[in-house]
Amino acid sequence: MTPSECPNLRPVLVDSGTEEVSDPDILDQILAIGDSYTAGIGSNKKDEEIEHSLECARYKRAWPVQLSEKDDWKNMNEDSKPQLIFGACSGNVMSDVRDKQPKQGDPSGNEREYLPIGRPQLAVMTVSGNDLSFAEILNDCIFRFPGVDRDKMKSCDQRIEEVQAKIDSAQFKRELIDTYAGVLKAGRDAGGADPPEAFQLFVGVYVGLFNHEDPGCNDVYWNILRWGITYKQYLTTDLRKKINTLIDNANVLTTSAANELESFGVFLVQGYNEGFSGRCFFEPREHRIHESGYQDRNAETGFWSYRSRWGEQDDGGEDGEGPRLDGQSADSDWDLFDEMIKVLIPNEEDRKKINNETMPWDVNPDLKNYPDIPAAIHAKAVEGDIAAQGMDDMQNRMFHPKGSAYRAFADKFMEIIASKRDKPEEHPPPPPKSKALTVVFQEQVTESPGPDHQWMFYEASLGQEAVCSHNGAKAIDPVEPVDGGTKSPDGDVDNPPWAAGTYKFKAYGEDCEYKCDGNNAGALFCPSFQGGVTCQEDTSKAKGRDGTVYCGNDGFASKSEHAVAFCEW
């Protein structure tokens, strides 16, 4: 699908009058938005958190900060470095990146979580990890933190299957494209790029966490054993590979979405995985390094672990990234979970009451309001508790890169940005869309037993409801089904199927064909455009009964309709 055919761009780019990417200009400001991977949560010490970033937890060794400080800018930017507008926010999902982060305005003097974006010429970001519940994957597959709802906790396989299903859904990719397009439009509207079409967006991928080839650690577990819990979640090569594969599959989706929008100025950045070679969890090292009491907290590992502590004064390592392997003990008398309990139950005598029969939430009933101990810590941090805020950042930074590992991100982003600052290939602006076709599942109820169904196709107005001929929509009839299509499909009007088959009809005066394999929204082919138009799922399709519209009774039958798909060109 070409960018000019991509329906997600219509409301944010094409119809707003903007065009495809134009010549890049001099960089005064660069914008960094996105999630915790961009915010650099926890890198490297608590006193290196950027002031006033609050819950967004932006840190001074995050890769956008390292990127902005590189001397390479001078080679392509008239001997100057651009100002960094740092608005990434830990914990944000794609809707936050669209709705909260790209706000117009001057960021100077703003002491808040969500900074106005200023007047940037390009933006950098990572996004979608929180939408895919990466934190829940780590809990269900690795730590399994105890909580009042621990009996309801999903198994690791259940969580992985759930996340993979989301990755495979058409809706998730559409939201990713919408997010990129929304940021691109906000950057163009900010007025820093001249012309606006010169604004560029560079999007990054996530990094695989584990060495999943060495079986020497198949007997290692990191999950929390407390209060009668004896189950051990072994971190086998199979489990490690499953998690790495899930990350790879998410990156494939990022790649596809970015490539679809490349001619509008969205560019993929990948390849920094090479900077993590030998620095993942479970690299071939002494077995003791991987055991529960140590958990790869050494400086040679590029990610923060459960056992990682704040700063040099605790770990004794370079830049607070943990101790070096040589001469280090693999034992630890410090445990993050125990520190969380101390924050939630400050009184030592109360903590002594906790045992296999008396849980923390029995001692402190307020904990019953949260699914697990980390969730209770987060709530206390939001309320302003200083100790809880430290614990919250420590738990949230687990499995995020350390400051030294983020150098690979900064280096690769710099390389790709430099390669795209030359004049790009010119493209003619896409023609504005003016026509729409809606595919509708119709149910007719008469006095005869059972309802009758048929497929209806409507010539419709862009972005307007077409069922029951609303908004001046024109029903196309008759429709000739061929090659597996049926005029009388089985189904439920509240949960309609896809219009499987091929259907021929005349639309807007042309002989057209609609084709669908029964697994998606299908495609429309007419003589006036080449290659066909990829149709999209109508938002009403998944709404159940709320998506069904009663059309009335024509004296012969009561009719109800449910929109399934739409095509625009």
Image (cartoon, rainbow, N blue to C red):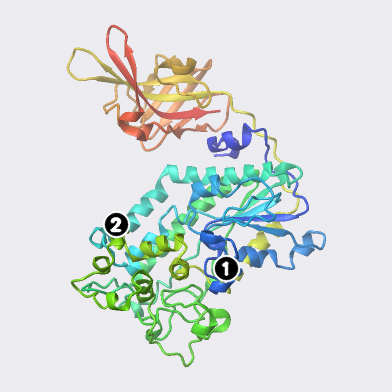
In-image side of 492 versus 241 (left or right): left
Please, is residue 320 above or below residue 8 in the view?
A: below
* Residue located 36% across and 82% down the image: 293
Number of other residues with Cα within 10 Å of mark 1, as a class: few under 14, some 14 to 19, many 20 or more:
many
Name the foreground residue: 378 vs 207: 378
Dot 1: element: loop
Rendering quarter of residue 145 = bottom left
Numbered disc 2: secondary structure:
helix
What is the residue that sits farthest to the right in this orientation? 78
Comparing labels 2 and 1, the label whose residue is closer to the camera:
1
What amino acid is labelled 1 in the image? Glu
Q: Position of residue 554 (x, y in %)?
A: 32, 8
Q: Would you place residue 488 above or below residue 23 in this image?
A: above
User: Which residue was labeled with disc 2?
Assistant: 158
How many numbered marks have been drawn onto this rendered protein structure? 2
Which residue is more in the foreground, 9 or 454?
9
**Residue 337 point in image, percent of width and height:** 36, 73
- Res 275 seen here: yes
- Decide: few, some or many residues near mark 2? Use Cα within 10 Å; few <14, some 14-19, many ≥20: some
Q: Can residue 425 be seen here?
A: no
Q: Which mark is residue 49?
A: 1
Residue 448 disc label: none
Q: Quadrant of the C terminus?
A: top right
- As displayed, is residue 497 above or below residue 477? below
Q: Sequence order check: which comes first, mark 2 or mark 1?
A: 1
- In the rendered image, which quarter contains the N terminus? top right
Q: Residue at x 65, y 45 (%)?
A: 104
Residue 322 locus on image (x, y percent): 50, 81
In this view, the residue in front, 440 or 148, is 148
Inspect the image, locate mark 2, and give the three-letter code of the amino acid beneath it: Gln
Residue at mark 2 to residue at mark 1: CA–CA distance: 35 Å
In front of the other: 526 or 449: 449
